[in-house]
Image (cartoon, rainbow, N blue to C red):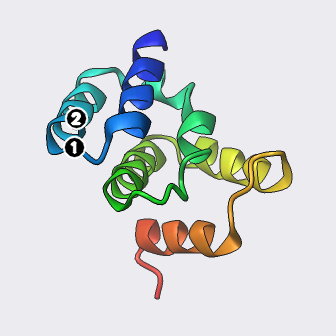
Amino acid sequence: MVLCIRLLTLLFTYGSRADVATAFVTGFNSINIDTWLTVIPQIIARIDTPIQSVRSLVHEALSKLGTCSLVATIIVLKLARSSYVRITLRVQAAFIRKRWCIR
């Protein structure tokens, strides 16, 4: 879990750099998906980041996690909506539409 948090910190801080984005994707794919499930709240907290490249990577990561554990992703999205983490309905809806190819 510590490695996941470190990778996320790098992504959120320097994710606009191509080499950092590539390193994140490599790290994401090399760490067991079950480990990533423990940090879904941290990923969702940045779902609406203003940096487009980071936002795309966050959406991609959540899509992969949703493939593995759809229930976990939906529960965390629901909790994030009703908790201190402010995620706009528009961003949530866009993510869900993209994930499940809904128009």
> With 69 as the anchor, is 74 left or right in this view?
right
> With 11 as the anchor, is 88 left or right in this view?
right
Disc ID at residue 17: 1
Q: Where is residue 50 in the image (x, y as percent from the top left)?
A: 48, 60
Q: In this view, does 52 lie above or below 75?
A: below
Tag 2 secondary structure: helix
Task: Identify residue type, mark 2.
Answer: Val
Disc ID at residue 66: none
Cα–Cα gap, marks 2 and 1: 5 Å
Q: Which of 101 and 49 is in front in this view?
A: 49
Residue at 52% x, 74% y is 94
Structural crowding at the residue carrying mark 2, measured as other residues with C-alpha within 10 Å and reported as few (<14), some (14–19) or many (≥20)? some
Disc 2: which residue: 20
Q: Which of 55 and 98 is in front in this view?
A: 55
Q: Residue furthest top?
A: 2
Q: How many labels does the image show?
A: 2
Residue at 40% x, 57% y is 51
Q: Pointer 2 and pointer 1: residues touching (CB < 8 Å)? A: yes
Q: Which residue lies furthest to the bottom in this view?
A: 103
Task: Identify residue type, mark 1.
Answer: Arg
Residue at 61% x, 66% y is 92
Residue at 42% x, 21% y is 4
